[in-house]
Amino acid sequence: MANTPQPPRRTALLASGVALLGLLTACGNESATSSGTPQPSEAARTVGADQSSGTATPGDTAPSVGTAPSDTAGSASASARTDGRCHTSELRAAVGRVDPGAGQRNFPVVLTNTSDRTCTVYGYPGAAFVDASGKQLGPDPERAPGSPETVTLTPGKSAWAGLSFSSPQISGARTATPATLLVTPPDEREPLKVKWTAGEVPVGGNASSVSVTALEAGTGP
């Protein structure tokens, strides 16, 4: 009787094995579920990547607003309004009425901005009297002492310089009657032609007796 197996013990061991197998199976199913289904945070990151590579969000388009064509046009427009000195092609020259006084004959030489932009003039204009054939009469006028200042010319505005010489009837200087006064804006090479109608000028000799002042705002005294 001592060698006869006891069934209740085998039954208990078999039950324990079945329970352990069920527990391992349950653990395996839980692991597969967690690794196969993305967590909410992972899903959100995926959607965000799709949006950034596809349709741009308002935040993505914001930087381009600052570089819109209207901003570029504004900068170009500002550049066009002010672009350094006035060029000969942008100016018109004229000679104003004589202002006699103390044996002197004084004329305002006026430069007017005819362009559609703002520009500047600084210093003395060039001036030369020429005859009908274009030959210069006498030397260039001397520059009168002064303190030049930059004159800003908006479209239509003018600057003037004084052209002066002693009355030939008083000075007795040799004279000539010019056909044209050539006026060259500061820092330019091409002159503007102004018909001279004021008669004789003391430019018949080699010594200069004509002077010109620096430009200032306006059309004359």
Image (cartoon, helix red, strand yellow):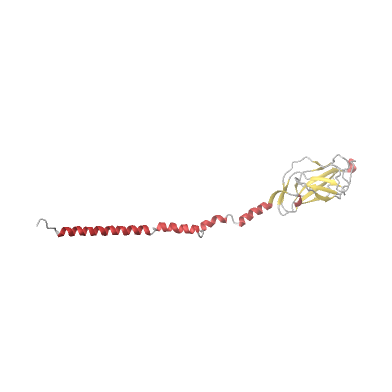
Q: Is any atom of residue 95 visible in this view? A: no
Q: Which residue is the extreme one toward the front?
A: 3
Using the image as rendered, state which of residue 82 and residue 44 is in the foreground: 44
Q: Is any atom of residue 127 visible in this view? A: yes
Q: How many dots with numbers? A: 0
Q: Residue at x 17, y 58 (%)?
A: 10
Residue 146 in the image, given as x and y percentages of width and height: 76, 41
Q: Residue at x 79, y 45 (%)?
A: 126
Residue 91 in the image, given as x and y percentages of width and height: 76, 51
Q: Residue at x 83, y 44 (%)?
A: 164
Using the image as rendered, state which of residue 201 and residue 45 is in the foreground: 45
Residue 43 in the image, given as x and y percentages of width and height: 42, 58
Q: Is residue 150 above or below residue 76?
A: above
Q: Quadrant of the N terminus?
A: bottom left
Using the image as rendered, state which of residue 180 and residue 52 is in the foreground: 52
Q: Residue at x 82, y 50 (%)?
A: 193
Residue 212 located left or right of residue 19 = right
Residue 9 located left or right of residue 194 = left
The quadrant where residue 204 appears: top right
